[in-house]
Image: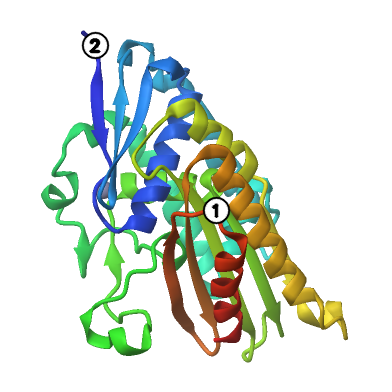
Amino acid sequence: MDGIVLYTPGHNLVTDSLIMHGIVRYLTWADVNIDSVKIRRLGERFIIEIGKSNSIKEDKAKQVLASLQDQAARGILSGGDYTYLTRFFEKIDATNLNRPAFKEWIRQFSQAITKFYFETVRIYADHNHKEEGAEGYGRAGYPTLYLPLGPVYGKYNQSNYSAREVPYKVCYTCFLFANLGLVYGSGVVRIHSNYNNADMRAILIMYTLIPPAETSMSDVVLVQRTLENNHEVYDLEKAGANTALVPSIVEKLANMLSDTMYTFRMNALVWALTWWPTYKVVTVREFDKPDPSLILKNLYLIYMS
Ligand SMILES: [Zn+2]
């Protein structure tokens, strides 16, 4: 038997969903025997059961990571004011409302790839991965889990859902896979005005699909095909007096989500952040019925907040 079982670390449902999607994409790059892989839900965590783990060629997957690192170096980290964003980094940029943090985010992503050359995805065979690395609030020397990668908020200010002051930290491997999941396994809608100004206002709605119980890896791969190109950025000034814009964006999203849920028999996980004058976590919600009117009602609440 050459099967292995991987566990997402148990940071929170959003981050674990992204890490699950990130692992699935990485395994695809590594030419895993897809039919031998099952994804199971374990509360807020996921189990990835790989029947034929001998089929995994991590060298191939790491070549893809190397090309992403190269894109980061040339387009973003090389100094200069000129930033060239490839599709991959365009998507991360679309999810980031905190403009000054972007370069550091990408620098840490690139560093995570460097460190991962000496690692393996089998690091997640350890059920206690998070505890053993002491990942969490205030851990020094690890990258920050930026809010779009997991809107974590703590006991100090739950009443207003502000982001907690002490940053939540994850290890470089978790950071890497959460970013892969963000790009390949989630969709993004951002609506903003006064972009890049001190009084920028923005709403960020992010979503992914996750199995309620058990699913095949091939279904998760198909879900990614429908989500990976979904990032839409709307500038309200450019929209001018088109007051129907936001309601139509929100309605389209509600319909798309419920159609995809129905097709794949998966749940939708939606998390939303706003920016004005800083981050606020508005909602983290899992939908288990493909009901467009229920989703629409909730998306409107995000828009109104
Ligand atoms: Zn970790």
Dot 2 or dot 1, earlier in sequence: 2
Query: In the rendered structure, which amino acid carries the disc numbered 1?
Result: Pro
Quadrant (top left, top right, bottom left, bottom right) of the N terminus: top left
Q: Report how far apart the C-alphas of labels 2 and 1 lie in the structure.
A: 38 Å
Q: Which residue is mark 2?
A: 2
Q: What is the quadrant of residue 194 in the picture?
A: bottom right
Tell me if residue 297 can be seen.
yes
Q: Name, please, the residue furthest toward the right.
A: 241
Q: Is residue 213 left or right of residue 155?
A: right
What SS does tag 1 mark?
A: loop
Tell me if residue 82 can be seen.
no
What SS does tag 2 mark?
A: loop
Quadrant (top left, top right, bottom left, bottom right) of the C terminus: bottom right
Question: Where in the figure is residue 164, as x and y percent of width and height?
Answer: 31, 80
Q: Is residue 196 left or right of residue 137?
A: right
Up-down relation of residue 73 to residue 248 (above or below)? above
Q: Which residue is mark 1?
A: 290
Return the residue nearer the eye: 281 or 211: 211
Residue neighbourhood size for the residue with mark 2, other residues' Cα within 10 Å, grouped as few (<14), some (14–19), many (≥20): few
The structure residue drawn at horizontal position 24% and vertical position 47%, both measured from the top left corner, is 9
Residue 191's disc number: none
Up-down relation of residue 154 to residue 3 (above or below)? below
> Mark 2 against mark 1, which lies toward the viewer?
1
Return the residue nearer the eye: 140 or 253: 253
